[in-house]
Image: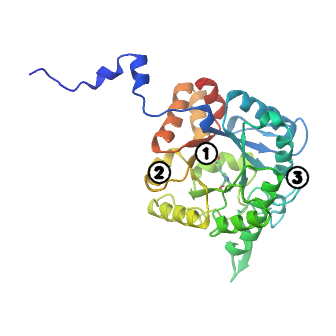
Amino acid sequence: MLFPATRMRRLRRSTAMRSLVRETHLRPSQLIYPLFICPGEGVRKPIGSMPGVFNLSIDEALKEAAECVELGIGGLLLFGLPESKDETGSGAYADDGIVQQALRAFKANRALDPLVLIADVCLCEYTSHGHCGVLVHERGEVHVHNDQSLPLLARAAASLAAAGADIVAPSDMMDGRVAAMREALDVAGHHDTPIMSYAAKFASAFYGPFREAADSTPQEGDRRGYQMDSANGREAMREIEGDIAEGADMLLMKPAGPYLDIIRAARDRFDLPMGAYQVSGEYSMLHAAFERGWLDRDRAMLESLLGIRRAGADFIVTYFAKDAARLLG
Ligand code: PBG
């Protein structure tokens, strides 16, 4: 008997052969690029912990968006840095809020039509205390009030849809926000605006650099009272079920790299389109290694994204979107 009968290497012999049997593909249209919009003109402020990522004024953001169209990127996820903040995060639902203004400018530019414009819906960038909802003092304790936060988040979603958001993406993790937003959107006539729920969002150390980029670090305490415990996979499935029941059209898992098992479990269980967010810390961590020459930049970047696709994500929100799209051609 000849040995071994099964030789896996037969199908790895050439680039063409490997390409023929490749199971997972990464395309620029599956990538979504996050933008941090700030007031002013001609502003392009680097974010120290995220090389290559900037706070951009609307005029600069328009240039960035045009580049994304050029590269065939699927969409943008917009975050705002308001001029001023207050207790209830009113900048999140102001008609002339920073992201609302950006959306109107983007929508006025037909050359940007190939991009799906996704508006993150949260209060944390807009509240003076940096929490994702309304803070209340009860029985000598401070906490984020779930039900008082819902109308404000719903208002933010409707206001962003009115300004031109193609999708609204709640990232606050209040219970009942998807239903509250669906109702507010429908009442305002935005029946056709989908909700992409950050259904399983974990309280993660990997959001650190984002909080520098979006200036959204809680002044006191942390987000463990509303974001999920990293240890819990079954609870993530319950979160997703709940959001689907409330009317979510799409799901977003977050972070991605350290939670690939959650992405896979969700993919096996639910049929909604699902994205994953390779968050700021995942980007910064890889970048730090690239800068030291410890990892091959292009290969490690694509491998990190391919892993997320292989785990089951249909699309990926990533700060590498432009660099990856350039490589993928
Ligand atoms: C807002 C929000 C956060 C991120 C996306 N939306 C920060 C947080 O929850 O603290 C993090 C994204 C990233 O780290 O890249 N709630």
- Element under disc 2: helix
Query: Dot 2: few (<14), some (14–19), or many (≥20) neighbours within 10 Å?
Result: some
Q: Nearer the viewer, mark 2 or mark 1?
A: 2
Three-letter residue code for mark 2: Arg
Colouring rule applied to residues: rainbow
Whether residue 293 appears in this view of the structure is no
Q: Is mark 1 within 8 Å of ligand 1?
A: yes
The image shows residue 131, relative to residue 12, as above or below, that is: below
Query: Dot 1: few (<14), some (14–19), or many (≥20) neighbours within 10 Å?
Result: many
Q: Is residue 13 left or right of residue 325?
A: left
- From mark 1 to mark 3, how far is it between C-alphas? 25 Å
Residue linked to disc 2: 267
Image quadrant where one finds the C terminus: top right
- From mark 3 to mark 2, how far is it between C-alphas? 40 Å
Numbered badge on residue 134: none
**Residue at horizontal 54%, vertical 53%?**
272
- From mark 2 to mark 1, how far is it between C-alphas? 19 Å
The image position of residue 61, as x and y in percent, is 81, 37
Residue linked to disc 3: 83
Three-letter residue code for mark 1: Val
Whether residue 253 appears in this view of the structure is yes
* Residue 107 figure quarter: top right
* Residue 187 figure quarter: bottom right
The image shows residue 254, relative to residue 20, as above or below, that is: below
**Residue at horizontal 85%, vertical 46%?**
104
Q: Is mark 2 within 8 Å of ligand 1?
A: no
Residue linked to disc 1: 279
Do the residues under discs 3 and 2 have CB atoms within 8 angstroms?
no
Q: Earlier in the sequence, mark 2 or mark 1?
A: 2
Q: Nearer the viewer, mark 3 or mark 2?
A: 2
Work out whether residue 204 or residue 12 is closer to the camera in this orientation and state it. 12
Q: Is residue 214 left or right of residue 107?
A: left
